[in-house]
Image (cartoon, rainbow, N blue to C red):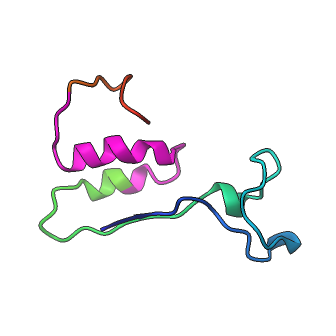
Amino acid sequence: MIYLSDHGESLGESGLYLHGMPYAFAPEAQTRVPLILWNGQSSDIDHDRTVGLKGGRNSQDALFVTLLDLFEVATDLTPAQAPR
């Protein structure tokens, strides 16, 4: 199961109750969105490597390539051409 929020939300932090502020002004609650991945014991996902990626720079755009990789789907797209 994969859950990826489409945007963050301000729920009262610093007096803000909204979403969608311009990125330059948006608080972290709006720019850092949750991603949850649950996989069963039979999965061959490298859990330790995945946890190691947690603090790195990433983007919602990487979901497409990640799903292709998880389902072992090969395409003619090179990594540079694939959406990230």
Quarter of the image that includes the C terminus: top left
- The image shows residue 51 at horizontal and vertical percentages of 39, 57
Q: Check the image and name the residue furthest to the left.
A: 42
Q: Is residue 31 left or right of residue 6?
A: right
Residue 8 placement: quadrant:
bottom right
Q: Is residue 61 magenta?
A: yes
Which image quadrant is residue 38 in? Answer: bottom left
Query: Furthest-bottom residue in view?
Result: 12
Query: What's the residue at 28%, 49% (across, down)?
Result: 67
5 sits to left or right of 22: left
Q: Position of residue 31 (x, y in %)?
A: 66, 54
* Magenta stretch: includes residue 71: yes
Q: How many marks?
A: 0
Name above or below for residue 33 compared with residue 60.
below
Residue at the (51%, 63%) spot, across then down: 5
Q: Which residues are magenta?
A: 51-75
Q: Residue at x 20, y 30 (%)?
A: 75
Residue 21 is left or right of residue 63, and the answer is: right
Quarter occupied by residue 78? top left
Which of these two is toward me, 12 or 48? 12
Say if 31 sits above or below 5 in the image.
Answer: above
Residue 1 % position (x, y): 30, 68
| Residue at the (57%, 60%) spot, across then down | 33
In the figure, 66 relative to 15: above or below?
Answer: above
